[in-house]
Amino acid sequence: MPRRILATLLLLIGSAAFAVDGDVSSTVDYGSRARMKVVLLCDGDHEATDCNPLDLNDAEYGLPTHLSASLTRTTGCAAPPTAEVRGLDDSIGMPFLYASLTAAGTSSVTVNPVRHRWIDVDLSTQNGCTDLEVSLRLFYPFEDLQE
Amino acid sequence: MRRLCLFLAALIFPALAFAADGDSIRVYGSGAYCVKEVLLCDGDHVDGVDVPGNGCPDTSIANSTDLRWDLQLGTVSTGTVATAGAGLPLFFVVEVRADNGAVTKTKVDIFGYDEADGTGTHQLNATVLQAGSAVTSLTVDPTTHRYINVEIDTEGDGTDLDVVLRAFTPKKYGVKCPGAS
């Protein structure tokens, strides 16, 4: 009986629940013009203020033409968190602030064209968050991805 | 002992620390773009001489405004006739990435030129670029000029000012970016 319950739980709970920073959550083709890849820059309870920087050059599809970052989930947070989305010229380089995202204010920023190789997120007032998500959408010309 | 210290220092400090104006510091690329990074300014750039007179890249010339970065060739322009080069990028970014040791940060302006000799001067930034300020970066999309230069608007008191230019060119699928490791 316990095995059956465990098996049922595994089926019910989606794989997204086990995602962590940097996971690819989806890849979507939109017609013939562009392909979009979604990466979770931040995902989880996030007592830590930093989400690991993503090296776009080493990402699966490489440097995108442009990108957008969105604060998509702030579950359980004691106070509204702020997510600073930044571009860096190195993995620990000088950060360039694209935007400060909040759920109630500006929650998404677009960077077009891409300007930095590394992207990271710096969080504040994230205490108590049980699931905080910042998603990054990377856009590629579809023809460049054909085999 | 001294040799040992020098050897250890050479190991510890990255090559970037020894870069100079006009040095290419990195070439990489994947996905949509090939990227070439070059230091338009690297060094103290504090000589008590305000604009005009402290342009980057100036290579070994202390106060020179007669050299510009040639986006077509991917080299410092010397005013000679153009030869085949990497080609103009789609767009480029100029960014103050460090102003080490500065209490008063240096302010810089970005210029585009019509000719290699500096004829036709056009300021590309609306607001000065300054480390630690709201404006540290300028994106020029699409590329508007072939010859680019950084001019010190107001000198600070730092010991190492780094201004980097990143040139983005389209990458062909399955083809390695020229010069990329």
Image (cartoon, grey):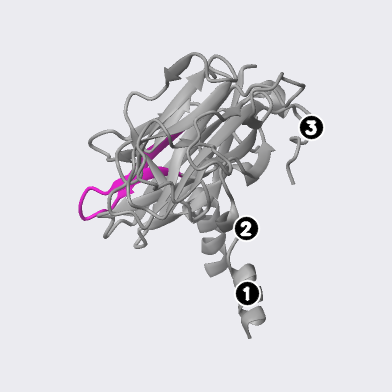
Say whether residue A61 is left or right of residue A51: right
Label 1 lies in what chain?
B
Say whether residue A132 is left or right of residue A88: left
* Start-end of magenta stretch: A68-87
Q: Which residue is mark 1?
A: B6
- View extreme (bottom): residue: B1
Label 3 lies in what chain?
B
Front residue of A6 and A100:
A100
Front residue of A78 and B115:
B115
Label 2 lies in what chain?
B
Q: Is residue A67 visible?
A: no
- View extreme (left): residue: A79
Labels 3 and 1 touching (C-beta < 8 A): no
Q: Which residue appears at 53% of the width and 36% of the height?
A: B165
**Which label sits in the foreground, 3 or 2?**
2
Identified by mark 1, the residue type is Leu
Q: Which residue appears at 51% of the width and 40% of the height?
A: B164
Q: Is residue B71 visible?
A: yes
Identified by mark 2, the residue type is Ala
Q: Main secondary structure of the magenta part?
A: strand
Tell me the crowding category of disc 2: few under 14, some 14 to 19, or many 20 or more residues within 10 angstroms, Cα based. few
Residue A127: image location, x then y, percent: 26, 59
Instruction: Compare marks 2 and 1 and give the one earlier in the sequence.
Output: 1
Q: Which residue is mark 3?
A: B175
Q: Which residue is mark 2?
A: B15
How far is disc 3 from disc 2 in space, using C-alphas? 28 Å
